[in-house]
Amino acid sequence: MVFTVLAACDLSGKCNFELAFPTVPTISELRERIDEVMSQEAALRRSPQAGQFAIHRAQVFDERMEMWVDLVASSQLEDYCQVYVFQKESPWHKDTPGRIPPPVKPVCGSPSMYRRSASPPPYGEHNAPLYSDLREGSPYSAGRSSYRGGNTQEEYSPARSQGGAEGLDTSTHAEKVKMVYDEMDVRKSRAVTLDDWNDTFAKLHITGHEALTDATVEDLFSKKADRNEDGVVSYPEFQHFAEIYPKLLDCLYFRFKRHHQDMLRKDRLKSQYDQLEDLEKKLDDARGQALEAESEGISNQQKIDECENAVQQAKEEEQDAAQAKNHAHDDSENARKAVRDAKQDEAAVKEEIKKRDAAKRQAQRAVENQEKKVQAQQAELEKLKKELEVLLRRVADKEAEISKQQESISNAERETEECRSKALDCEDPALEDQAKEKTQATAAAEDDLKHCIQAENERTAAHRNAQRQVSQASQAKAQAEKDAQAAKVKEDQKKKIETRAEKAVADQKRAIERNEEKDADADLKRQEQEDKENELIIMEVRLREQREAVERKEEHLRGAHRDFSQEAGRSSPRGSYEA
């Protein structure tokens, strides 16, 4: 038996080789063979600077899982399985994604010359896994297209996958025997036990009918398949069993294919339900986010309304402050005018006082001069009196001078009194009182002006504060409107996401319903087909039993005829009977 492995690699371009082994190879045997073939090919394709070919890691395509998985054990290998080999990344090499070409067989002695495989490749072109993804440890899952003659239905047989419908299946009898036996041999030990036998017939819905009871299935195992009665069915024994029961073989073959198709369909339906669950979760999240965005929009609208009220209130306060500022400015102007008028009156009174003070000082100076004259004349009088006493004799002469001097003193005293009266006339208490009143009025006007200026400054500050509040409220309103606009855009986006999620959920549900309807139709057709097949199987088993019973009776009659011939002393007409 030849075991074939397809090995692909990137050697300045994708290449794919068909490697044949006498049996299932071990991992080390497979690595040695791949290293030998790929090294010869690398020597021809790449420059010497790239270095020798070296295997970094390998993956195998799992037909059942429909994905690439790391190759770690030989039990993962199947006949005609596809393996992809990775090399370490270097400046001269880098694995790039691409299509894997159909396999070719390496020719010994001339690695560069290859011929196409005589048998059609079981998988066709594969998607090469991304090296960067595999280097990080994540398995590469890629779709594969197989040689199926344009039919998109997934086929089971790795040896041939050309026909989609059972009626068009071109597999030979030997291929059917191999596939069925490989499926029954779950441990890959080349020995099918009774448990494996019973599990296969139960899994394929062959047991439980009127003819194929559990006892009948066990009889088929022990009396028909296990010819050497060692408790297991080997491959040659199953080949003989398949020759006896060809209809049962076909039933097992096609039911295995349908079983794997059902498993793929169930996995696909489960995947669709998982996707539906994820889509429903996303839909719930989208609805929650849409509600949050709507709530945020309502909150932003409330903020806008609050900011609008604040702006209106600030504008009213600003208008009141502006009016108060204008009133305070008018009061200040009136106070300034009153101060100017009071200062002018005060200046006029002070000017008059200055003039009177000047006249008063002049009169006082005249009084002082007169007093000095009086004092001088009194001193002169005393001197004359002394001289009179001394010079009594000269009294007569001096009396005339005394009289003149007294007259002069009288005139001087009279002038002094006149100066004093003039000085008294210069003094005006009412004018001084008026000057004091004007000074006090000026001080009071200045105090009023100070208070008015202070009030005006306070009103100006209040007006500026009101203007600042209006500006802040306007900025807050503009920001709130901007936030509301952004929230509206976000809400629209969330609603669009919600709508798309609802559409995706509805589409997924419709797809699931269509698939379930198709599965129900397929199950119904399969049940009908299985019922027909079961009738054929029952008929075949019964016909086989009848044939064996006839053969046993015929053998018994032949033996009885031989015994009778021997007893009668006649020769047996066996040849003519057999003819």
Image (cartoon, helix red, strand yellow):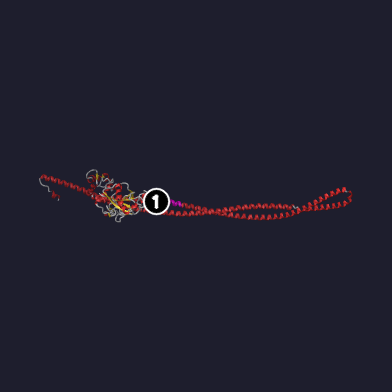
Q: Position of residue 103 (x, y in %)?
A: 29, 53
Q: The disc labelled 1 sits on which kind of residue?
A: Glu
Whether residue 312 sits left or right of residue 206 in the image: it is: right
Q: Position of residue 27 (x, y in %)?
A: 30, 47
Of helix, strand and loop, which mostly describes the magenta segment?
Answer: helix
Q: Position of residue 252 (x, y in %)?
A: 26, 49
For this rendering, which residue is in front, 496 or 153? 153
- Determine if the magenta segment contains residue 164: no
For this rendering, which residue is in front, 180 or 83? 83
Return the residue found at the far front. 48
Q: Is residue 226 above or below residue 487?
A: above
Q: How many marks?
A: 1
Return the residue found at the far left. 569
Return the residue found at the far top. 230
For this rendering, which residue is in front, 566 or 45? 45
For this rendering, which residue is in front, 325 or 128? 128
Whether residue 444 sits left or right of residue 6 in the image: it is: right
- The residue tagged 1 is 280
Q: Position of residue 230 (x, y in %)?
A: 23, 43
Q: Quadrant of residue 312?
A: bottom right
The reply to whether residue 523 is in sight is no
- Determine if the magenta segment contains residue 288: yes
> Which residue appears at 15% of the width and 47% of the height?
558
Q: Secondary structure at mark 1?
A: helix
Whether residue 336 sits left or right of residue 180 in the image: it is: right
The reply to whether residue 340 is in sight is yes
User: Which residues fall within the magenta stretch?
Assistant: 287-293
Label 1 Cα crowd, 10 Å radius (few <14 / some 14-19 / many 20+): some
